[in-house]
Image (cartoon, rainbow, N blue to C red):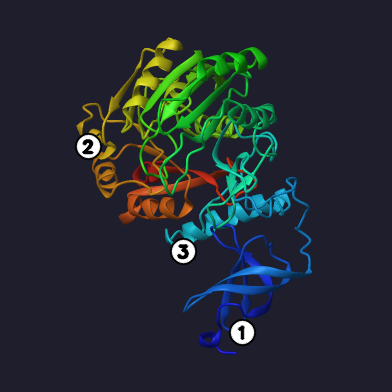
Amino acid sequence: MSKTSWKQGDLVETEITDLSDTGDGVGRSAELVVFVPDTVPGDRVVVRLVNVKPKYALGKVKELLQSSCHRIRPACIVADKCGGCQWQHINYQYQLAAKRKAVIQALQKIGGFTQPRVDQVLTAGEPLDYRNKATYPMGISTSGGVIAGYYQKSSHQIVNLNQCPVQDSRLNPFLAQVKQDIESNGWEIYHERSHSGIIRHLGLRIGRRTGEVLLTLVVRDWILPGIEQQAQEWLDHYPPLVGVMLNRNGDRTNAIFGNETRLIAGTSDLKEEFASLKWKIRPETFFQVNTETAEALLYEIQSELNLQGKEILVDAYCGIGTLTLPLAKQVHLAIGLEIQEYSVAAAQINAQYNHINNVTFHWGKVEELLSRISDKPDIVILDPPRKGCEPSVIETLRKVKPARIVYVSCKAATLARDLKQLCQDDLYTLSRVQPADFFPQTAHVEVAAFLVLSNLVKDT
């Protein structure tokens, strides 16, 4: 059968030979490339085509004819339905190998680096029970009960959960109880289509080292009768719970949190320990979900930089200073740049909390702030969102020429694109790349790339 004659509903037998950058298995039948979720290289499967494009097709497993040696039984009973994880059916060591391969391929194909040094994927802790934060959309079941969970793969249907093996297990007791209490209070669940109802999401956050928990209900409107009494009951019933909050998101949007948060009972932030520092973290604060591996990657960065205490360091896209503050203790001056005003405020609070006085934080667009810095930086840390750096950021760095750049990225493709531009005309040399597994059981991989001015490499 030729490529153009395939149609939706056709059955195709294929062997899965690779994994895509989104985590799907990749198979081929004649000239047709098929992407198949819930498969692993070595599987032989019968696939039903669900979406046929001119150059490829998307399929769904109809029958598993032969299992790969890398296939395992998922830890979660709804792993085949829930969209929270993609790879629970894949042996963890193979997950790590696949992530390293994906980074190498991106650097070669997109970045043009022929033989990049990519170290083994860094991992700390366990591949389950690692997430320090969970936000669950809420809904109503067909029988009328309150449900909370993650969306089913490729749909907007909620898979109801009472526990989740990838989140910190200390958060599991809250799931069933909070749903039951919402029902008992008669609080209306938000309806997306009609933009009616009140409760949109349940947010849970825990300090991995302290055990302190925050509980947040994301609501369309503040009116939630009896919330003060219920919040106090939750605090009394769960000793680790330190704060209950409401966050209002009244917009028709896919964004989870709105701009306003109110404390109902307890405290508005939890305490955490990270990189030998103390932190105050709010429900909406960005903080890496895998505390242990994030800390391990920070130590890797510190080791690579071998700071001497004389350097001027700029941390672009600094967030609440997760990298800035630990590194500030080892340099002469640290400067954090961040577009989110509340993150800058949180970073300043945490600097004061830890008595770190050689750091300043600036609010605004990185591409504008970077060019205004009066002191030439010796080191620039980049940790942009998934879309990567703005072109003007790359242009400014090529003009300023800091001796070293550390580029931390959550998307290998945009990392490779930006590294190619930074290294253009042999300005910088890519010395090595360190992947880190912040998100076990998914296809996501965090990467730290280390760049050195090429003339410094030649001088040594």
Label 3 environment density (alpha carbons within 10 Å; few <14, some 14–19, many ≥20)? few
Left or right, residue 23 beside residue 196: right
**Which quadrant of the view contains residue 457?**
top left
* Residue 187 shows in the view: yes
Label 2 amino acid? Glu
Left or right, residue 277 beside residue 337: right
Label 1 environment density (alpha carbons within 10 Å; few <14, some 14–19, many ≥20)? few
* Label 3: which secondary element: helix
Left or right, residue 178 beside residue 55: right
N-term-proximal mark, 3 vs 1: 1
The span from disc 2 to disc 1 (Cα, nearest Å) is 51 Å
Q: Residue at x 37, y 51 (%)?
A: 418
* Residue 276 shows in the view: no
Label 2 environment density (alpha carbons within 10 Å; few <14, some 14–19, many ≥20)? few
**Which quadrant of the view contains residue 143?**
top right
Q: Which residue is mark 3?
A: 109
402 above or below 1? Answer: above
323 above or below 366? Answer: above
* Label 1: which secondary element: loop
Label 3 amino acid? Lys
Q: Residue at x 72, y 54 (%)?
A: 89
* Label 2: which secondary element: helix
Q: Which residue is mark 2?
A: 368
Question: Residue 144, image x and y in percent?
Answer: 61, 42
Q: Which residue is mark 1?
A: 30
